[in-house]
Image: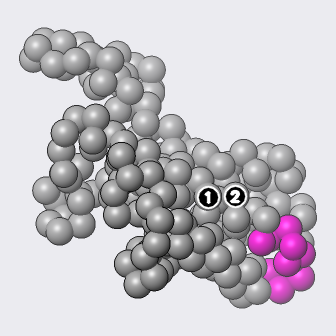
Amino acid sequence: MLVFGSFAAAMFARSRGEEALDAAYGVLYLGWPIVLLIWLRDLDSTVGLHWTVLVFAVAWSSDIMAYFVGSTVGGPKLWPRFSPNKTWSGSAGGLAAAMAAGLGVAAVLTPGAEPEAVALVAAAIGLAAQCGDLMESFIKRRFAVKDASRLIPGHGGLLDRADGLIAAVPVAAALSLALGAGVVLWR
């Protein structure tokens, strides 16, 4: 479906005189994480739910705390060319929040989970979420737009609410495979 959707988007864009490759990439950029999120949730009923809750909690916590810490503490810029407001302090705060959220989810859903493993998995998902946020900033600069859409005014658009998830979901899916769908995390 994604290959067909990419082809259809490319042909539609081309018929309108727009860049076909950008349209095809957009379908894959958004489509793969959606497919992987469905796959992740569809794992064994309990394990899939745990991974899904984990990825949302970690990505959102990372995003919220990165903004809060970065705007409060400030400091050196993370990638000023593409995302001039993001700071290293915000990134560190986001990473700490990601790990805390992961530990919180594990404590509530699976009290026997190994905290070190949960913290490392949450850190990887949190870093991926931050990379997704930076990627969204890069894409917006490439197309010279301030907001990805006008659907949510003042928030940079709908993709700014999901940009971290776009990168975090594939990492969570890969980790679930590497860890045997949760043998270490979700006992």
The percent position of residue 68, horizontal first and vertical second, equals 42, 81
Considering only vertical position in the picture, is 158 above or below 155? above
Q: Which amino acid is tagged 2?
A: Ala
The question of residue 53 being in magenta is answered with no
Q: Which residue is drawn at the image coordinates 60% and 71% (left, top)?
A: 92
Q: For label 2, count other residues whose C-alpha is less than 10 Å away and answer few (under 14), some (14-19) or many (20+).
A: many
Report the Cα–Cα distance between label 2 and label 1.
5 Å
Residue 127, numbered circle:
1
Q: Secondary structure at mark 1?
A: helix
- The residue closer to the viewer here, 133 or 174, is 133
Q: In the orientation shown, which residue stands out farthest toward the front?
A: 76
Please state if 178 lies on the left or on the right of 109 as rendered.
right
Q: Which amino acid is tagged 1?
A: Leu
Q: Quadrant of residue 52?
A: bottom right
Q: Which residue is drawn at the image coordinates 70% and 65% (left, top)?
A: 123
Residue of label 2: 124
The percent position of residue 41, horizontal first and vertical second, equals 62, 57
- The residue closer to the viewer here, 105 or 138, is 138
